[in-house]
Amino acid sequence: MTRSEALLISVVIPAYNYAHLLPRALDSVLGQLSDDVELIVVDDGSTDNTAAVLADYQARHAALQVISQVNGGAAAARNRGIAAAAGRYVLLLDADDELLPGALAALREQVLVQPALGMVLGAQISVYPNGRERLRVPPAVPSAGPRALIRRYLLQKRISISHGCSLFRRDLLLQRPYPVQLRSGEDIAVFAFLLVSAPVAVLATPLARIYKHADSLRHNRDKAEEYALGMVEAVFSSLPADCQSLRRRYTAQRYLSLFRAAQNAGSRGEARHFYARALRLNPLQALRWSYLRKALRLLFGG
């Protein structure tokens, strides 16, 4: 058996201008490498000294594979790494996060016992800017049909999927690449597809430390409506027919999120527009008191 045939897990790290934190991520993986695990870093056109950091690591770790590309965003970098990977499963680790000791061993054990799995969802330790840490254990994923699973994930938010502490089957990632046209939220379309495509296992074992940042792209509201509708299209374009009836409700949910963001930013005209759109799409959802009271304040200046 060749090495490529023996590979079980490919760890892919997309990196863009995180040279100061990349060694932490690299060290957390290199200490767990084995004959059935490979490590690939995709340098997504970094303009800091990421290339120098990777060259230094390659000189000391022959197993490290580095791919350099013109900046295309996180989705493009993930797709490039997945395409180059040889493992049956892929773990996508952000360059500013780190695996915990024993993470790959726990994942290996799970997929060897259940080789049909499409995803393994592990726990994480969330680390906040103030240094506070919180253990997050993903809730169980029930055995249910695609529509029930998508409803639970997209609308009820009772299924939690995150990079760094999740393992994905590579052939499924190749079927549903990350949508490169989205600047944020591009993972939702991929996670939804994976969720309905194969069985899912959940581990209570913490697998990664995930670092939260205050400068998240989610706060950028430029062309917010265009991106929200693009996200809806990306999500539902890959879902089976029995899930399509949820599209209208999910679109309303995205508009309500835009409504909250616009109101918090003091953009009253935008907020009114977004709420009106949500109200037309799904009156029951928009008329929930948590949204309605904010809409009434907009109308009456409260």
Image (tube, rainbow, N blue to C red):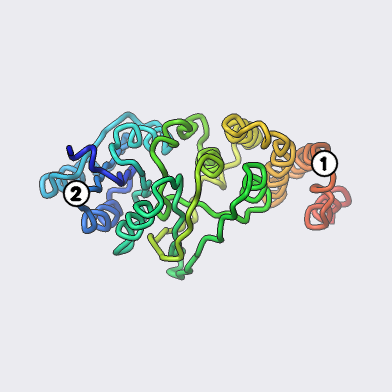
Name the residue beneath numbered marker 2.
35
Residue 80 image point, x, y percent: 34, 32
- Asked if 131 appears above or below 178 in the picture, the reply is below
Q: Secondary structure at mark 1?
A: helix
**Residue at point 41%, 55% (across, down):** 165
Q: Position of residue 79 (x, y in %)?
A: 39, 33
**Residue 154 horizontal side relative to residue 124, left or right:** right
Pick whichever of labels 2 and 1 is earlier in the sequence. 2
Front residue of 67/47: it is 67
Q: Residues within 10 Å of mark 2 (few under 14, many from 20)?
A: few
**Residue 179 picture location, percent across and down:** 49, 32
Give me the C-alpha separation between circle 2 and circle 1.
Answer: 55 Å
The quadrant holding residue 231 is: top right
Residue 109: x %, y % from top left = 34, 57
Name, please, the residue furthest toward the right: 300
Disc 1 crowd rating (10 Å Cα; few below 14, some 14-19, many 20+) is some
Residue at the left extreme, as displayed? 59
- The amino acid at mark 1 is Leu
Q: Which residue is disc 1 drawn over?
A: 279
The N terminus, quarter of image:
top left
Residue in view at x 84 percent, y 47 percent: 284
State how many labels appear.
2
Secondary structure beneath label 2: loop
Q: Nearer the viewer, mark 2 or mark 1?
A: 2
Location of residue 234 (image quadrant): top right
Q: Is residue 208 above or below residue 8?
A: below
Left/right placement of residue 259 relative to residue 154 reads: right
Type of the residue with mark 2: Asp
* 296 in relation to 250, above or below: below
